[in-house]
Image (tube, helix red, strand yellow):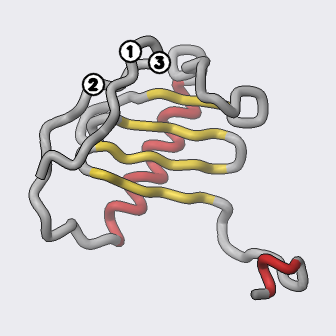
């Protein structure tokens, strides 16, 4: 396991996108954008270099970063296949009142 033992370096563009309908998130470098509803604009932006617990939403302060990460998500969506399972309705997500995202389906 070269990546784990340090004998090889990871390749790629340093971005990671994942979804759990309807939520989608992306991490690029130290920045992470969580979109509770992937079809709606905006979301919660965190700088993980200074906020590993994701307590401070920077989306309002850094709209250009949100737009850049949304573009990454759209690029990713354009090359992935839609899941075969059905979509569930958006679950509330807020830094003050976090509700767990369950598996209602």
Residue 102 horizontal/vertical position (percent) = 26, 42
Left or right placement of residue 53 versus residue 2 in this view: left
Residue tagged 1:
97
In the image, 17 versus 5, the foreground residue is: 5
Q: Quadrant of residue 94?
A: top left
Distance Cα–Cα, label 3 vs label 1: 6 Å
Tell me, for residue 92, which label it has, or none: 2
Other-residue count near label 3 (Cα within 10 Å), few / some / many at <14 / 14–19 / ≥20: few
Residue 14 horizontal/vertical position (percent) = 67, 61
Residues marked 2 and 1 touching at CB (< 8 Å)? yes
Distance Cα–Cα, label 2 vs label 3: 10 Å
Q: Compare marks 2 and 1 and give the one earlier in the sequence.
A: 2
Residue 5 horizontal/vertical position (percent) = 86, 80
Q: Quadrant of residue 45?
A: top right
Residues marked 2 and 3 touching at CB (< 8 Å)? no
User: Which residue is at 37% across, 47% downward?
Assistant: 24
**In which quadrant will I find the N terminus?**
bottom right
Secondary structure type for disc 1: loop
Secondary structure type for disc 3: loop
């Amino acid at each position: 396991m070269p990546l784990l033992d340090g004998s090889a370096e990871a390749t790629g563009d340093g971005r990671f996108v994942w979804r759990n309908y309807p939520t989608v998130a992306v991490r690029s470098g130290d920045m992470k954008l969580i979109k509770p509803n992937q079809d709606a604009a905006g979301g919660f932006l965190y700088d993980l270099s200074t906020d590993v617990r994701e307590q401070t939403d920077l989306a309002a302060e850094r709209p250009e970063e949100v737009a850049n990460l949304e573009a990454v998500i759209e690029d990713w969506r354009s090359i992935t296949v839609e899941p075969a399972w059905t979509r569930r309705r958006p679950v509330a997500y807020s830094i003050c009142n976090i509700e767990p995202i369950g598996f209602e389906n």
